[in-house]
């Protein structure tokens, strides 16, 4: 719509438009069910090795999760072997709908162990921290990522430079809008 007149588009929605996240969610809606179906056998075998005769197809299916937000998603499972297979399944499925994984953003990580445990998702850092006062021996903490904090500080810095010479009330009012969101 331009100047109150409808103009048809020759291709899809422009990246960054308000409808883009919704369209991405619609496109990725079937990702979790496809991954569970494609990995059903591997998931059941893994659950059977872990729990023995108590393993069930339902428990195996529930052991993997796909969390989607706009064009971002995370595949969660406790086994690195399953995640490596899931990456292949996801790549193939994305090709069928005309999308591909961005190699620079694709990462397989453990949330507790490893060189750099945890991962960043939607400006948050998700990681398990070892503690002694728990039966499990760890605690899940979800914090703002360092990149997100740096970006916010930079935005405040630029705003303060623009407000030089302004009254205290104006500075506080402008900063409150930025801090509170």
Image: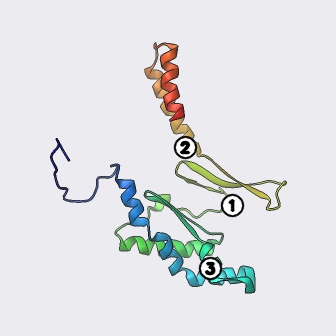
Report the disc number at residue 33: none
Q: CA distance from mark 1 to mark 2?
A: 21 Å
Question: What's the residue at 52%, 51% (across, down)?
Answer: 122
| Residue 163 place in picture, x, y as percent | 45, 19
| Circle 1 crowding by C-alpha within 10 Å: few under 14, some 14–19, many from 20 | few
Q: Coloured how? A: rainbow
Location of residue 26 by image quarter: bottom left
| Residue 21 place in picture, x, y as percent | 39, 55
- The residue wearing badge 2 is 147
The answer to which of marks 2 and 3 sits earlier in the sequence is 3
Question: What's the residue at 66%, 57% (across, down)?
Answer: 117
- The residue wearing badge 1 is 114
| Circle 2 crowding by C-alpha within 10 Å: few under 14, some 14–19, many from 20 | few
Q: Residues at badges 3 and 1 in contact (C-beta under 8 Å)?
A: no
The answer to which of marks 1 and 2 sits earlier in the sequence is 1
Q: Is residue 136 above or below residue 19?
A: below
Task: Give the SS element for disc 1.
Answer: loop
Question: What's the residue at 42%, 61% (across, down)?
Answer: 25
Q: CA distance from mark 3 to mark 1?
A: 30 Å
The answer to which of marks 3 and 1 sits earlier in the sequence is 3
For the residue pair 82 and 53, the one nearer the viewer reads as 53
- The residue wearing badge 3 is 58
- Examine the rendering and report whether any part of residue 36 can be seen: yes
Task: Give the SS element for disc 3.
Answer: helix
Task: Give the SS element for disc 2.
Answer: helix
């Amino acid at each position: 719509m331009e100047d109150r007149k409808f103009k048809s588009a020759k291709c899809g929605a422009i990246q960054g438009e308000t409808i883009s996240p919704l369209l991405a969610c619609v496109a990725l809606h079937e990702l979790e069910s496809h991954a569970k179906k494609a990995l059903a056998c591997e998931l059941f075998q893994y659950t059977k090795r872990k729990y023995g005769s108590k393993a069930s197809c339902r428990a195996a299916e529930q052991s993997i999760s796909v969390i989607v937000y706009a064009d971002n998603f995370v595949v969660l499972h406790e086994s690195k072997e399953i995640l490596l297979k899931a990456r292949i399944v996801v790549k193939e499925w994305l090709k069928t709908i005309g999308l591909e994984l961005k190699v620079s953003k694709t990462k397989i990580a453990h949330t507790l162990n490893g060189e750099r445990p945890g991962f960043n998702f939607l400006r948050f850092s998700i990681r398990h921290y070892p503690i002694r006062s728990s039966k499990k021996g760890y605690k899940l903490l979800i914090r703002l990522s360092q990149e997100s904090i740096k970006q916010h500080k930079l935005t405040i810095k630029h705003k303060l430079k623009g407000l030089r010479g302004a009254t205290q009330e104006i500075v506080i009012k402008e900063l409150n809008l930025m801090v509170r969101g």
